[in-house]
Image: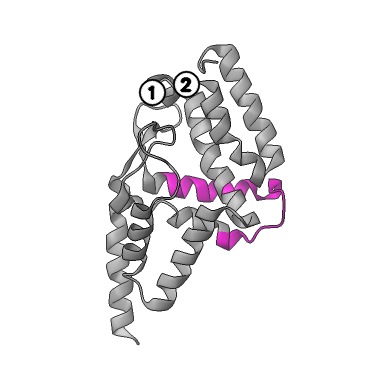
């Protein structure tokens, strides 16, 4: 048994427990409670398993689930940036990259390298796996906001064009899910819970 390796792995496991304390702006479906990052990552992973058949291209489910479980770990250091934040870019930042290096670097070298590589792949959005994972990441808040009468869209004054622009990433991972998502957006406008 490699006790030193195990100690590093346990240290990482303890460190990522902090993800449970990072609150997102979106609220749980049909709820007024904010979702935390750990709940978000779990939910996306289950969504990917259930919706995998709708991916635009063949995907490696284990890689997709790994991406979804780790993609927000950087927020332990960098915090959660609201996708519609006008002051700070939601795109990959140097702050997030440093967080990824620090947190994944707690692990033994081979595991640290694997998770950092998966995180970077998710951020770069070049592979089928990353595109489908991103589709899940963009779909979940849409489901939350439509179930909460506009939720963060209304709370932060986000209009249809901004939502559409961010949610269009779904189409790169699944045309079928994008068709459904676009329908939800249009219905939200008709209901008056998303402003044009």
First of labels 2, 1 by sequence position: 2
The residue under the point 52% across, 31% down is 142
| Residues packed near mark 1 inside 10 Å, few (<14), some (14 to 19) or many (20 plus) | few
Residue 120 on image: x %, y %: 49, 60
Which residue is label 2 attached to? 150
Front-most of 196 and 59? Answer: 196
Q: Quadrant of residue 34?
A: top left
Whether residue 21 can be seen here: yes
Foreground: disc 2 or disc 1: 1
Residue 192 on image: x %, y %: 53, 12
Position of residue 43 in the picture relative to residue 184 (left or right): left
The quarter in which the C terminus is drawn is top right
Is the magenta region chiefly helix, strand or loop? helix
Compared to 114, does 79 lie above or below?
Answer: above
The residue under the point 60% across, 40% down is 169
Compared to 27, does 131 lie above or below?
Answer: below
The quarter in which the N terminus is drawn is bottom left
Q: Which structural element holds mark 2?
A: loop
Q: Which label sits on residue 156?
A: 1
Q: Is residue 103 magenta?
A: no
Q: Which structural element holds mark 1?
A: loop
**Magenta residues, as a range?**
40-63
Compared to 109, does 39 lie above or below?
Answer: above
Front-most of 110 and 166? Answer: 166
Position of residue 117 in the picture relative to residue 127 (left or right): left
As drawn, the residue found furthest toward the bottom would be 1
Q: Are marks 2 and 1 in contact (CB under 8 Å)?
A: no
Real-space CA distance between mark 2 and mark 1, rounded to the nearest whole angstrom: 10 Å
């Amino acid at each position: 048994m490699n006790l030193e390796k195990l100690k590093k792995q346990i240290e990482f496991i303890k460190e990522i427990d902090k993800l449970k304390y990072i609150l997102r702006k979106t609220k749980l479906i049909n709820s007024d409670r904010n979702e935390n990052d750990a709940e978000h990552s779990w939910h996306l992973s289950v969504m990917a398993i259930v919706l995998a058949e709708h991916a635009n291209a063949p995907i490696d489910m284990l890689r997709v689930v790994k991406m979804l479980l780790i993609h927000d770990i950087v927020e332990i250091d960098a915090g959660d940036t609201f996708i519609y934040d006008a002051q700070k870019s939601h795109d990959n930042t140097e702050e997030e990259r440093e967080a990824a290096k620090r947190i994944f670097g707690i692990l033994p070298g081979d595991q640290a390298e694997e998770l950092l590589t998966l995180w970077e792949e998710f951020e770069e959005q070049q592979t089928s796996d990353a595109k489908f994972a991103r589709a899940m990441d963009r779909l979940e808040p849409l489901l939350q906001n439509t179930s909460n009468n506009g939720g963060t869209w209304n709370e932060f004054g986000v209009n249809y064009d901004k939502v559409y622009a961010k949610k269009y990433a779904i189409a790169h991972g699944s045309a079928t899910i994008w068709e459904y998502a676009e329908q939800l957006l249009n219905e939200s406008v008709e209901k008056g819970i998303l402003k044009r």
